[in-house]
Image: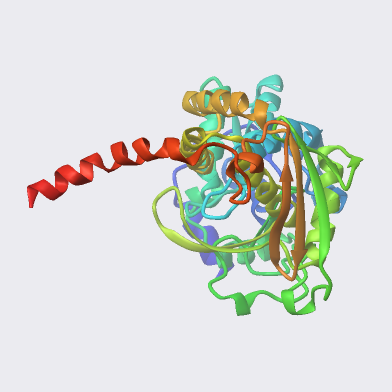
């Protein structure tokens, strides 16, 4: 079967590329791309570019080891801090959610493609390359970014161009002597913000092995007692947990652990992808789920009704753009400007109770809070209620007119 695949690939007319910069994770897709470039595009030099976006030291070392087995070096770029400060921070302010997905991979693919393009131009490469398939949303995210920053540099996407299924890829990996490991069919993609589990390869929860989770503890195995968290925000960004100031990285590491132990962070959603085809997607994101829930509640306390309604519309459009591969679109920058301005009022503290997969807001306080119990509470005399009589009469006037129509 492998030989048949090779013969099929040989019939495809390809333009050679002598020097190619490859977005390299060390997984099956990007590792196979090395051999495909060398054998069918006649590439003499493949620059492997591995970008740290918070996937962790273990994943980075796996990439180095895999490259070493092929007698190749890796150009490693550390973009974790940039990802947190310039990307995740924007995601928090925008309450990032595409059907419940916090948009992790959707962001990192833009960032990785930008870094790969910079290296390609610096080293005067003929092309840039990456290992997405024709069924992947990432093909759009990366291609858009390559086009924007690459000054017309050629893009090669071998897996898609050869129309390879995952089964085909595994056969070719064996043919070329590429070692790979997958805990699940389809692999996974991890960042400190969110982990994508075997994207598009799973149709039933029963297909997920119980030992696959990194942070999340299934509800039936989660702690039997409640955990309380105090999260403090400044201008929309979390700065402290339980009165201890931390960096965003420290906060996410802490909440991923604590949240996971309490059964928080499992996301199961039906996703409508860029080409409008549905897929069932699973994610693991305890820290993101907790932070976004706290942030949304703080906005509800601090925003006037019309600002909150409009912000929800902006957040939805922000998520759609990022998911569809438009992080660098001018409209996305315009939305960021509005969102950043709105966050000047999002400073305060949210107290949460988490228990076996549930999150409950206990208290939400801010110096910018528009909740005034001394005015609104039923037990108070915040204002003379009689002044609302004419207002209610005026509000009812259109209904009096509607009654006349009968």
- Toward which corner of the image does residue 168 lie, by quadrant? bottom right
- Toward which corner of the image does residue 116 lie, by quadrant? top right
**Side of 80 relative to 360 (left or right):** right
Q: Give the residue displayed 70% in from the left and 50% down from the top.
A: 288
Q: Nearer the viewer, residue 300 or 198?
A: 300
Q: Nearer the viewer, residue 69 or 114?
A: 114
Whether residue 149 is visible? yes
Looking at the image, the residue that sits furthest to the left is 406
Q: Give the residue displayed 54% in from the left and 19% down from the top.
A: 151
**Side of 229 relative to 376 (left or right):** right
Percent x, y of residue 356 = 74, 71
Percent x, y of residue 248 = 81, 39
Percent x, y of residue 223 = 83, 73
**Side of 226 relative to 343 (left or right):** right
Question: Where's the N terminus, which quadrant?
Answer: bottom right
Whether residue 68 is visible? no
Percent x, y of residue 187 = 67, 62
Q: Nearer the viewer, residue 142 or 4?
A: 142
Where 63 falls versus 153 (above or below)?
A: below
């Amino acid at each position: 079967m492998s030989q048949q695949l090779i013969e099929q690939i040989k019939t495809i007319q390809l333009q050679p590329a002598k020097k190619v910069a490859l977005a390299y994770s060390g997984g099956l897709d990007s590792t196979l791309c090395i051999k495909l470039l060398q054998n069918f595009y006649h590439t003499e030099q493949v620059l492997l570019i591995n970008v740290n976006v918070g996937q962790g030291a273990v994943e980075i070392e796996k990439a180095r080891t895999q490259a070493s087995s092929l007698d190749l070096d890796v150009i490693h770029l550390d973009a974790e801090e940039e990802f947190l400060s310039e990307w995740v921070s924007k995601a928090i302010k925008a309450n990032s959610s595409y059907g419940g997905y916090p948009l992790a991979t959707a962001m990192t693919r833009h960032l990785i493609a930008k870094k790969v393009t910079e290296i390609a131009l610096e080293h005067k490469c003929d092309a840039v390359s990456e290992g997405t398939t024709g069924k992947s949303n990432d093909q759009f995210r990366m291609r858009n970014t390559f086009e924007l920053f690459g000054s017309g540099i050629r893009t090669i996407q071998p897996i898609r161009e050869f129309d390879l299924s995952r089964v085909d890829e595994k056969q070719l990996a064996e043919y070329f002597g590429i070692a790979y490991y997958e805990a699940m069919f389809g692999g996974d993609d991890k960042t400190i913000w969110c982990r994508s589990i075997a994207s598009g390869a799973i149709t039933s929860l029963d297909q997920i092995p119980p030992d696959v989770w990194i942070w999340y503890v299934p509800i039936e195995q989660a702690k039997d007692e409640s955990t309380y968290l105090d999260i403090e925000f400044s201008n929309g960004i979390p700065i402290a947990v339980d009165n201890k100031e931390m960096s965003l990285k420290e906060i996410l590491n802490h909440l991923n652990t604590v949240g996971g132990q309490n059964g928080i962070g499992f996301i199961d959603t039906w996703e409508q992808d860029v080409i409008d085809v549905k897929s069932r997607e699973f994610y693991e994101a305890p820290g993101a789920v907790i932070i976004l829930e706290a942030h949304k509640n703080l906005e509800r306390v601090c925003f006037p009704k019309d600002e909150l309604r409009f912000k929800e519309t902006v957040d939805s459009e922000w998520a759609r753009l990022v998911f569809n591969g438009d992080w660098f679109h001018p409209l996305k920058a315009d939305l960021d400007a509005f969102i950043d301005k709105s966050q000047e009022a999002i400073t305060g503290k949210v107290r949460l109770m988490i228990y076996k997969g549930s999150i409950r807001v206990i208290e939400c306080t801010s110096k910018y809070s528009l909740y005034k119990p001394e005015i609104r509470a039923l037990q108070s005399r915040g204002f003379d209620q009689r002044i609302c009589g004419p207002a209610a009469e005026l509000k009812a006037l259109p209904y009096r007119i509607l009654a006349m129509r009968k």
